[in-house]
């Protein structure tokens, strides 16, 4: 279901953006995390498509989507895709970078959003400050600067395990999938390439104006500061709730798809 034969393309103002569109019913949009692509949702797409229209884009600069050649915001790309597909208002679901994109989208394009689910994220204003993430960012910079793609991938998959586990503690299929997707995305870029992305800023003061239900799903092994930010988001939106999937890290949808899918489907049924 999620192989290249199913991918379609939306001709945006700055290149073609890839997306999967399957199932029928109320639309649910799945936005992947950084460096990977829509295949991250392989365990969610069949479960959701049984009763919903599922749209899973490759974010600009990722997977099969075009890179940017001018300033852009990912939230605007997502809004343009939803308008192109006449798919709004939709339920937006995002993990990590995708979680930021979906909260940015409800802030910038609220008319296109029916509800929001974030995982491994809060808003675009949140930044990890713990020593483990600081060290990991330094390792990213060192390996990429040296052209050591395999070393970079070794560092990248550590995010799935988190600070309190080793990659070897995971089902080996998880780091394998992450490496495959990230290697493909990296292959589409060149060293020193300009970053045209324009972040959405000043999100926290606008959070109380979010007028749709918001669900936060986070792994219990995430850093305390991320879990606290998710709880803050749940408190400050008018209709918010935070759930924790114990024993999982940054990607509960990969580690415990049964639990993640159950929480998501229960949320959708209640809308």
Image (cartoon, helix red, strand yellow):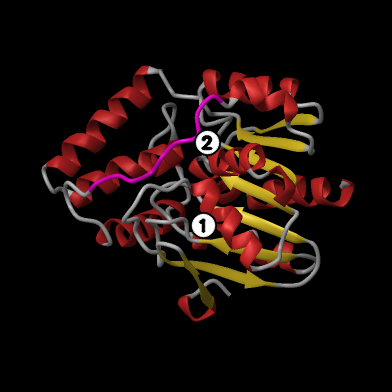
- Please state the horizontal and vertical placement of residue 9, each as a whole percent of the image: 50, 73
Q: Position of residue 228 (x, y in %)?
A: 61, 18
Image quadrant for the N terminus?
bottom right
Q: Relative to residue 42, is residue 174 depicted above or below?
A: above
Q: Position of residue 132 (x, y in %)?
A: 36, 23
Q: Nearer the viewer, residue 51 or 150?
A: 51
Query: Is residue 42 in sight in this rendering?
Result: no
Tell whether label 1 touches label 2 (CB within 8 Å). Answer: no
Mark closer to the chain start, 2 or 1: 1
Q: Nearer the viewer, residue 107 or 128?
A: 107
Which stretch did the figure color magenta? 194-202
Residue at (41, 18) in percent of width and height: 129
Figure label count:
2
Query: Dot 2 corresponds to which residue?
Result: 249
Q: Position of residue 112 (x, y in %)?
A: 71, 51
Q: Is residue 102 left or right of residue 196?
A: right
- Name the residue furthest left: 146
Q: Secondary structure at mark 2?
A: loop
- Residue sitting nearer the eye, 114 or 241: 114
Q: In this image, 207 relative to 269: left or right?
A: left
Q: Which residue is mark 1?
A: 40
Residue at 62%, 67% in the rendered image: 84
Q: Residues within 10 Å of mark 1 (few under 14, many from 20)?
A: many
| Residue in the picture at 32% in, 23% down | 134
Please name the residue shown 37% across and 63% down the image.
Answer: 66
Whole-angstrom CA distance, mark 2 to mark 1, is 15 Å
Q: Quadrant of residue 25?
A: bottom right
């Amino acid at each position: 279901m999620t192989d290249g034969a199913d991918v379609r393309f939306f001709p945006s103002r700055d290149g073609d953006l890839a997306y999967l569109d399957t199932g029928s019913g109320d639309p649910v949009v799945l936005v992947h995390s950084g460096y990977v692509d829509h295949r991250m949702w392989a365990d969610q797409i069949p479960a959701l498509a049984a009763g919903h229209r599922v749209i899973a884009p490759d974010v600009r600069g990722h997977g099969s989507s075009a890179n940017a050649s001018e300033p852009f915001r990912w939230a605007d790309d997502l809004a343009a895709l939803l308008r192109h597909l006449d798919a709004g208002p939709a339920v937006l679901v995002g993990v990590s970078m995708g979680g930021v994109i979906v909260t940015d989208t409800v802030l910038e394009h609220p008319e296109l959003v029916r509800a929001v689910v974030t995982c491994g994220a809060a808003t675009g204003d949140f930044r990890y400050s713990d020593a483990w993430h600081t060290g990991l960012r330094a390792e990213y910079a060192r390996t990429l600067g040296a052209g050591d793609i395999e070393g970079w991938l070794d560092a990248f998959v550590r995010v799935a395990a988190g600070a309190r586990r080793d990659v070897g503690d995971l089902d080996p299929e998880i780091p394998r999938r992450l490496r495959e997707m990230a290697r493909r995305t990296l292959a589409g870029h060149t060293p020193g390439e300009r970053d045209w992305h324009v972040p959405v800023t000043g999100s926290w003061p606008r959070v109380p104006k979010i007028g749709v239900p918001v669900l936060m799903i986070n792994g219990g092994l995430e850093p305390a500061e991320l879990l606290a930010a998710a709880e803050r988001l749940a408190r400050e939106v008018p209709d918010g709730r935070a759930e924790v999937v114990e024993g999982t890290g940054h990607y509960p949808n990969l580690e415990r798809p049964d639990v993640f899918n159950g929480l998501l489907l229960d949320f959708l049924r209640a809308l």
